[in-house]
Amino acid sequence: MNNWADNTNCAVTVCDTEGVIIYQNEQSVAVNGDMRGKSMIPCHSDRSKAIIARLLAEGSTNAYTIEKKGIRKMIYQTAWRRADGTVGGIIELSLPIPAEMPHYVRG
């Protein structure tokens, strides 16, 4: 499982509680540039900054879809936790998705 995130078809970005990027896989660097060791906060709007603050304060999740350069993506942002259970930061997964995709309800 060495560097599993580099062998996926999605961008994986991880920040700490100050918004400093502590990990990016190859896909994340290709899309966002190399932001490791830099704050992601200045790159975001006031609305996005409020969402980031909420995710860090509540340890919650934010998910939505976008379309960029003709590619639809699901953005899934969620808090990650340290071994002691405290919020350590946020992980963002940017997953390419088809324009139309099946939806299944399972019981």
Image (cartoon, rainbow, N blue to C red):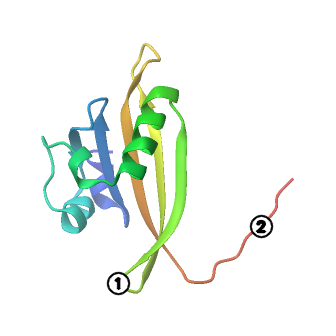
Question: Which image quarter holds the N terminus?
Answer: top left
Classify mark 2: helix, strand or loop. loop
Q: Residues within 10 Å of mark 2 (few under 14, many from 20)?
A: few
Horizontal and vertical percent position of residue 89: 35, 32
Task: Give the amino acid at mark 2.
Answer: Tyr
Q: Is residue 4 left or right of residue 60?
A: left
**Is 82 rendered above or below residue 59?**
above
Classify mark 1: helix, strand or loop. loop
Alpha carbons under labels 2 and 1: distance apart: 28 Å
Question: Farthest right residue?
Answer: 107
The residue nearer to you, when weighing 21 against 44, is 44
Horizontal and vertical percent position of residue 79: 45, 35
- In the image, which disc is placed on residue 69? 1
| Residue 100 position by quadrant | bottom right
Task: Give the amino acid at mark 1.
Answer: Lys
Horizontal and vertical percent position of residue 53: 41, 35
**Is 86 rendered above or below residue 25?**
above
Q: Badge 2 is on which residue?
A: 104
Instruction: Give the label, 2 or 1, closer to the camera.
Output: 1
Comes first in the chain, label 2 or label 1 = 1
Question: Farthest bottom residue?
Answer: 70
